[in-house]
């Protein structure tokens, strides 16, 4: 493809992302799948531009609006070209030529925008903090309150692309052996800093095609996510519930820590995701995992199985503010329920799931959020409303700036073996 054709493709793809309710990576995958004639180098160039625009969306948008223009796919790409110094005001019309496979001719308004942006810096001194940190309006005040003086540092860290971490499946391999094989295959691989099973790889290799991935010896999993599973400390022989299992990433880690002994029931209201997870379980060599679809967090199955489990793992649905490095489009478009809807849902899920824990058992509540409203506040409210539980051990809080992981929170809640209430009450 000629450079102008790549730019036209980026405009088309950005327009689809803006209009879609699906994550940007899913939109991009579908776009390229429908256009198999686009070669690998062209796909890489188009994707690089797309994600650069997504990561600078609020800053570009501030400039576009300040210049009196509408934020859309074309104006975003024009702004990206100008701030990237790829074009001058004089050369931009040559790319927007209107010829076949190239962008349509620039309108007078678009030319005016390019003129306003010419030789400007992306982050001038008068740009407000919210736009400078790419923070969505709804999260600005809550994140400032939650992160305090670390707000700008943490938000800056979330602007960088997430690294790729692998978790070694201890049932099938040892980390040292995996490292040796990856390096032998000329993959830049290093030990993780937090998890004893973690490996960080650089250069974006095609891990999903590697033999160690295909035989279940490794899984792609953020090191922070691995630490959440480690905190749960699922033991061989235990009865375990993964209440919001989703695609099964943490279920895999729990099963491996149990050495295939005991039982895990992976549950979720999205049955299709559980079906996809079954293949991951088989590939990992895990035979102690069952799946069960729930009609809701109040499914009757939960009531029928009260106080039967040693560990109830609740990876609650949340805003995902801790994953903005990995899913940057979540900063400026809500792809699911908002915070006002999520907070009562988290409470309901925890309130229902805790019934499954036996006396002396534990509930692990986790999110991939940086917001206190979804984390500490939920735990405090739960303990207040459920005196039969107590928060035990240290709370795990991981952030992009401090730990170079996604943002995670987890707390262990242990069910008392004896009731605090007098006989006949409660």
Image: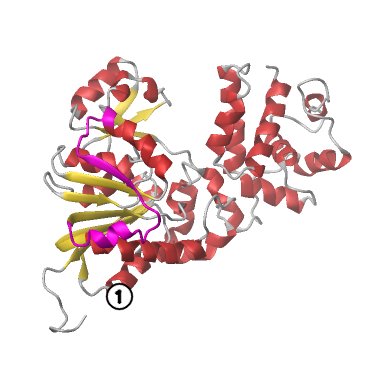
| Above or below: residue 48 compared with residue 150 | above
Tell me, yes or no, whether the highlighted magenta stretch contains residue 305: yes
Q: Is residue 389 magenta?
A: no
User: Is residue 270 in view from this perspective?
Assistant: yes
Q: Quadrant of the N terminus?
A: top right
Residue ID at (24%, 24%): 178
Residue linked to disc 1: 385
Image position of 357 (left or right of 142) = left
- Where residue 403 appears, as percent x and y from the top left, is 34, 47
How far from the left and from the top, in percent, is residue 230? 22, 46
Q: Residue at x 82, y 21 (%)?
A: 99
Q: Residue at 68%, 24% (x, y): give it.
A: 6
Locate residue 135 relative to residue 241 in the image: left or right.
right
Q: Quadrant of residue 252?
A: top left
Q: Is residue 337 above or below residue 278?
A: below
- Image coords of residue 128 (percent x, y): 62, 58
Q: How many marks are shown on the rendered structure?
A: 1
Quarter of image, res 308: bottom left
| SS category of the residue bearing label 1 | helix
On the image, the x and y values in percent for residue 25 come to 53, 35
Residue extent of the magenta highlight: 282-308
On screen, residue 84 above or below 353:
above
Asked whether, in this view, residue 152 is left or right of residue 202, the answer is right
The foreground one among 423 and 60 is 423
Q: Residue at x 61, y 54 (%)?
A: 131
Q: Is residue 394 visible?
A: no
């Amino acid at each position: 493809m000629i450079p102008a054709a790549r730019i036209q493709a980026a405009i088309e793809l950005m327009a689809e992302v803006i209009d879609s309710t699906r994550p940007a990576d899913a939109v991009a995958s579908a776009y390229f799948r429908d256009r198999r004639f686009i070669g690998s180098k062209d796909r890489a160039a188009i994707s690089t531009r797309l994600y650069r625009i997504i990561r600078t969306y609020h800053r570009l948008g501030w400039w576009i609006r300040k210049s009196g223009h509408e934020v859309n796919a074309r104006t975003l790409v024009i702004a990206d070209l100008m701030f990237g110094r790829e074009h001058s005001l004089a050369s931009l019309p040559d790319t927007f030529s209107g010829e076949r496979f190239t962008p349509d001719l620039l309108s007078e308004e678009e030319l005016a925008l390019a003129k306003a942006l010419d030789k400007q810096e992306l982050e001038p001194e008068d740009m407000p903090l919210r736009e400078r940190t790419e923070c969505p309006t709804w999260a600005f005040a809550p994140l400032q309150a939650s992160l305090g003086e670390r707000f700008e540092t943490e938000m800056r860290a979330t602007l960088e692309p997430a690294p790729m971490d692998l978790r070694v499946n201890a049932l099938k391999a040892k980390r040292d052996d995996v490292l040796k094989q990856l390096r032998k295959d000329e993959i830049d691989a290093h030990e993780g800093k937090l998890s004893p099973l973690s490996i960080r790889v650089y250069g974006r290799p095609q891990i999903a095609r590697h033999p160690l991935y295909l035989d279940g010896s490794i899984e792609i999993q953020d090191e922070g996510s691995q630490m959440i599973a480690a905190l749960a400390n699922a033991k061989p022989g235990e009865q375990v519930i993964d209440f919001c299992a989703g695609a099964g990433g943490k279920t895999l880690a729990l099963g491996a820590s149990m050495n295939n002994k005991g039982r895990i029931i992976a549950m979720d209201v999205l049955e299709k995701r559980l079906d996809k997870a079954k293949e991951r379980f088989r590939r990992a060599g895990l035979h102690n995992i069952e799946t069960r679809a729930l009609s809701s967090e109040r499914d009757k199955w939960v009531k029928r199985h009260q106080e039967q489990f040693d560990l109830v793992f609740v990876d609650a649905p949340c805003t995902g503010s801790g994953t903005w490095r990995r899913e940057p489009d979540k900063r400026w478009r809500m792809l699911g329920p908002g915070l006002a809807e999520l907070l009562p849902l988290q409470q309901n899920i925890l309130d229902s799931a805790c019934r499954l824990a036996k006396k002396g058992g534990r509930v692990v509540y986790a999110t991939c959020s940086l917001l206190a409203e979804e984390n500490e506040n939920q735990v405090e409210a739960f303990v207040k409303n459920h005196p039969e539980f107590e928060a035990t051990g240290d709370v795990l809080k991981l952030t992009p700036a401090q730990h170079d992981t996604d943002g995670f929170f987890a707390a262990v809640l242990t069910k008392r073996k004896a009731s605090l209430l007098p006989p006949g009450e409660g």
